[in-house]
Image (cartoon, grey):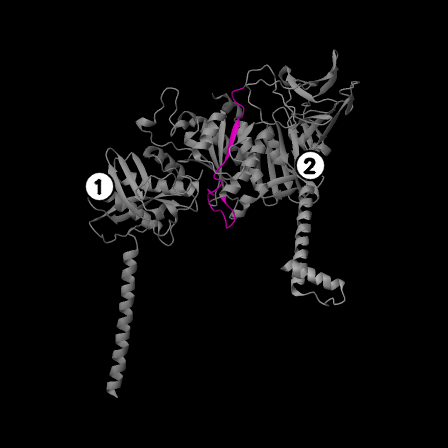
Amino acid sequence: MILRHFIIALSLLLAAALVMGVYAWHMRGRAAATPAILTDAQPVVAAPATGPTERITLWIAYDDIGMLRAQSAQIPMPGARQQRAEELMRALVQFYLEKNSPHPLAPGSEIRSVYLVDPGIAVIDVNAAFADGHRSGILPEDLTIASLIQTISANIAGISKVKILVEGNRRETLAGHADLSHFFDVSAMNQLSTELQSTQ
Amino acid sequence: MLLTRWRRTLRGANGSAAPKKPPKPFRSLNWRLAAGSGSAIFLFIAVLLLAAAPSEKRLSIYSTAANYSVSVVQRQGHDYVGLLEVLEPLGTVTSKTDGPRWRLHYDNVLGEFVNEKTRARVQGRDADLAAKFILENGRGLIPVASLSSLLPRFLGGPVTFHESAERLFIGSVATHFTASVAPDDSSRLIFHFSSPVNPSVASEPGKLRLIFNHEPVTSPASPTLTFGSKTIPSAIYSEGNGTAEITVNTAIPLMANFGNDGRTITLAPAKSQPQTAASVPAPPKPQAALAPPVAQAPAPTRRYFAVIDASHGGTDRGEALGPTLAEKDITLALARDLRQALESRGITTLAVRDSDANISLDDRAFFTNTSHAAVYIAIHAASSGHGVRIYTSMLPDSSADDQDRGPFRSWPTAQLSSTSLSQMAAAGTADALKRIQIPVRVLTAPLRPLNNIVTAAIAVEVAPSGADVSSLASTDYQELITGAVANGIMSIRTQLGAAP
């Protein structure tokens, strides 16, 4: 009789341990998938993947109000300038790929690489999914470009021109409107960003 | 095979052994015949209905400030016009909606209207309308029949309304005319107008018609004029749907020649054009006897004041605004409306795209630059946000290779010298939209072909009026927007036109 009760109790304990293990595994996966982007309102320091975390400013596009807003975040930043730029852009794109993104990008959108060329040139190379699946429209495309360029120029000093490539190639427009065929002047983009921070 | 069986069946029907029920192929043929006939009847009725459909009604308004037209809509069996659209070209107008109440300020005059009520108040005094006032999406509609009583209260002066012809004259703006045959040549008829005119001229056997779409030409003492000439016995004045027309009855083909700065039109027998051996055959001309205005004046360098560009087209559908709603179709509809709105205000307008055609961005810019127009307006449509967004060019970073060289402009930065004009056009257009309470933003964008245009260039992106994207396809909404954009361009016409 005692043995039977013991077996039942042990089975229940094992089942509970198994359930808790699965839950812990699930939570670990979610934690790994969540970007380490944090707003000023909820400052939390995330554990760095590589290197120490750093507070940076992301310029986030909001489709519903058609605006651009600065937002602080703490992300792991490598030491080398070019890798820093890449991490920054990837963090931004990752933010837009989240479930409740204020400016959704197409699934599979990625930053392939970022090149910093002196004097003051940044080349952002996005993948085909980024451009092919981008929502068409002057404002959504304007917001994406302004968000990328403002974010990189605000956090990496000395960038005055930005070129956006798709799969390493020059492309006419992002999704039918925004002209990607030339270098963007960062000072002109600053003006656009100012306009996009106002509803007027 | 089917035919053979049918013949066989017909023979059977004539003979003694006619089947009680047609065999299956015959029944199938009957069905096909019925279906074919039905389709034909349906198509015929559809064509008849389309042919019988009334053309859009417009009210032409003539004033010292501008000659323009507004669309007339039918509501509850009456003709209505938007009061704000009527007054806007004449002065400063603002309107405010407060539930069923609608207040309109014209300069210092306040008008108060209540939805579904026939009584309004203007400057604190009651005014009775011929039918109920209608408030639609913030737009105040008044019955056309009340214009002659209501407008003098706002304008402080008399108006003359030819209601059956949909023509409204504000103040003493009428253009009068006389017509007489030349004393030395009875085959020449000379019209003298009190103001310059530029009518469309069309001929048909036995008649030549002068059609005045924009001029406040009014009837002479008698609408029928007789000249005692065998070749040109008479002319008849008529007016309707916002236009005036003089029909000249003639026994010979006539050609119209303009002179005296558009104040004189001389109709003379058409001469056959001598052809030189080396000349290239001209394309066949329509029967219209057109002649250039002011024959001896130097050719103007600017034939069109505005260029309207319906963005996208052909395989480039633009944004998918809905399951069946493509941006390219909405831009085309808006561009056509805007062209009409501008031309009705006397602004000559050229359309880059008037069909579902593929046109490259470079071609659009080239087409615009060679037209020497004063302003370029690209039309876009979007599902996001609401109201209207107006864009000017965000020029790219120019490298050493992109600099202007002498008289040659750099293609990627051709807009550089016109940015202030473009900003002025954007501001003027935004002001006109704000006046009718359309939400509007002015932004810059890296948007081609704005960068490649050498004159004032803006892009007008129309978003839905509310949450419903289908409002983009609404004719009323489109006309509201294009009317305001046209008013905006009108308001800065002088500054734009003065630019080289």
Disc 1 to disc 2, how far (Cα)? 70 Å
Residue B477 picture quarter: top right
Left or right: A62 as drawn, with respect to B89: left
* Residue B107 appears in view: no
Residue type, label 1: Arg
Is the residue B12 above or below the residue B102 in the image? below
How packed is label 1: few (under 14 Cα within 10 Å), some, or many (20 or more)? some
Quarter of the image for the C terminus of chain A: give it.
top left
Q: Nearer the viewer, residue B133 or B224?
A: B224
Q: Nearer the viewer, residue B14 or B321?
A: B14
Residue A115's spot in the image, x, y percent? 25, 40
Is the residue B262 above or below the residue B205 in the image? above
Residue type, label 2: Val
Q: Residue furthest bottom?
A: A1
Q: Chain of mark 2?
A: B
Which structural element holds mark 1?
helix
Is the residue B90 above or below the residue B101 in the image? above
The residue drawn where x is 24% and y is 36% is A117
Left or right: B33 as drawn, with respect to B138: right
Residue B221's spot in the image, x, y percent? 77, 22
The residue drawn where x is 61% and y is 19% is B293
Magenta span: B300-326
Quarter of the image for the N terminus of chain A: give it.
bottom left
Q: Chain of mark 1?
A: A
- Residue B303 part of the magenta-drawn span: yes
- Residue B47 part of the magenta-drawn span: no
Q: Which mark is residue A81?
A: 1
Q: Which mark is residue B144?
A: 2
Q: Nearer the viewer, residue A1 or B315?
A: B315
